[in-house]
Image: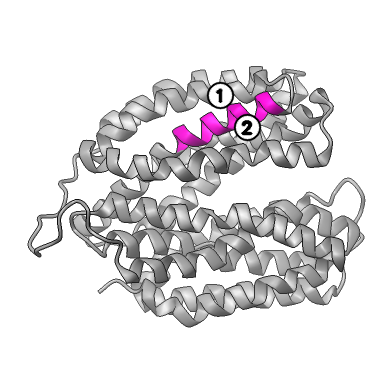
Amino acid sequence: MAVFFLQPVQLGIWFSRVAEVQYALGLSKSQLALALLGMPVGLLPTLYFAGKLVDEMGPRHALMWCLPPMLLVGMTPGLAVGPVSLFVSLVALGAVVAFAEVGMNVYAARVEKARRKAIMNRAHGFWSLGVMVGSLIGVQLATFELSAFAALAIGGVILLPLLIAVAALLPFVEAPEHHEPEAPMGRSIPTALYLIIAIVLGATLVEGAMIDWAAVYMREVAQFTPGREGLAVTVFSGFVTIGRFVGDAINTRFGATVLARGCLGAALLGVIVLASNLGAYASFVGFALVGLGVSTIFPLGVTASAALSKRAEARNVSVMTFGALSGFLIGPPAIGFLAQATSLDVAFLLLVPCLMLSIALAHRLSVR
């Protein structure tokens, strides 16, 4: 839980200073949007290699080696002098973050197997909490008129000894013994993994759309108080965190299928509320429902992917993560193009069939 909490704090600092960097570099919205694609562009292809490395080194050692360079590279967006350098720095950051993401998720999956106890949702709840704390730190440092680079550097210096200590203190969790015969290293990806990816992709498409367009929706559609439209992102992120903290208890009591369908149903209801444009305060309810709805799907996907094989946990987790996080590349621009042709509330209806498909396949997240 400590690793999941500390790892994204510097990312949270960066998220809170994006607007400042945009202003300092004189970037238009389109230039900033293209530059911010650097992180998923760097992260997604690296997941393949990250899976292989974690398989060979083990998740505990992989974390100890990748966390220090992650903090170092995490300072570089603050040094950007233009859109190209910002894009390049974020590509590098995404590539390093990929190793940390796979390492943390594989380790958590092994703990679940060894202890026979669901922890994945709570672990990701701490990750969301780390982003929130980091963003608050970034805002506070801005009041002292510290630059984005100074804030990222301070965060990196403070986090470095903490993360190294926590990674070193992680108890050794032995990989599961291999009882079943499996194909050699060139083994094909199981069909079940593709179905898990389809479920989680539906949730990440929605999550990416909400993060990028929530504030714009509140300003242009709900016509909320100018300057306070960002509260929609706060409400959405807060309910993602709440959902992840209670998700493991519900999973243990009722099972992954019930949890997934309940969450995805809430997300579907929230999207319908937003598409109906019922007013500003109803829109906040919609964002809360969507945040609660998408909160547990990625953690459940990690657990289900790792459970498919005892020899290829890291491979399965990295492939699932690659497919799922593609939603952050596809969802926001798709919503934007459709909104340009119609309106943002109508564009949100594009998310309805994605969620319905995820609900129909939700039983695939159940681990036997």
Q: Which amino acid, by three-letter code, is at mark 2?
A: Ile
**Can you tell which quarter of the image residue 209 is in?**
bottom right
Residue 95, magenta (yes or no): yes
Q: Which amino acid, by three-letter code, is at mark 1?
A: Gly
349, 294: nearer the viewer? 349
Tell me whether circle 2 and circle 1 mark residues in contact (CB < 8 Å): yes
Q: Residue at x 46, y 60 (%)?
A: 298
85 is higher (above) or lower (below) than 207: above
Classify the position of the C terminus by image quarter.
Answer: bottom left
Q: Helix, strand, or loop for circle 2?
A: helix
**Mark 2 and mark 1: span between their CA atoms?**
8 Å
Q: Which mark is residue 198?
A: none
Residue 360, magenta (yes or no): no
156 is higher (above) or lower (below) than 28: above
Residue 19: image location, x then y, percent: 77, 34
282, 220: nearer the viewer? 220
Q: Earlier in the sequence, mark 2 or mark 1?
A: 2
182 is higher (above) or lower (below) than 282: above
Q: Which mark is residue 155?
A: 1
> Disc 2 marks which residue?
13
Numbered range of the magenta stretch? 84-97
Residue 339: image location, x then y, percent: 82, 63
Left or right, 158 with respect to 288, comes to left
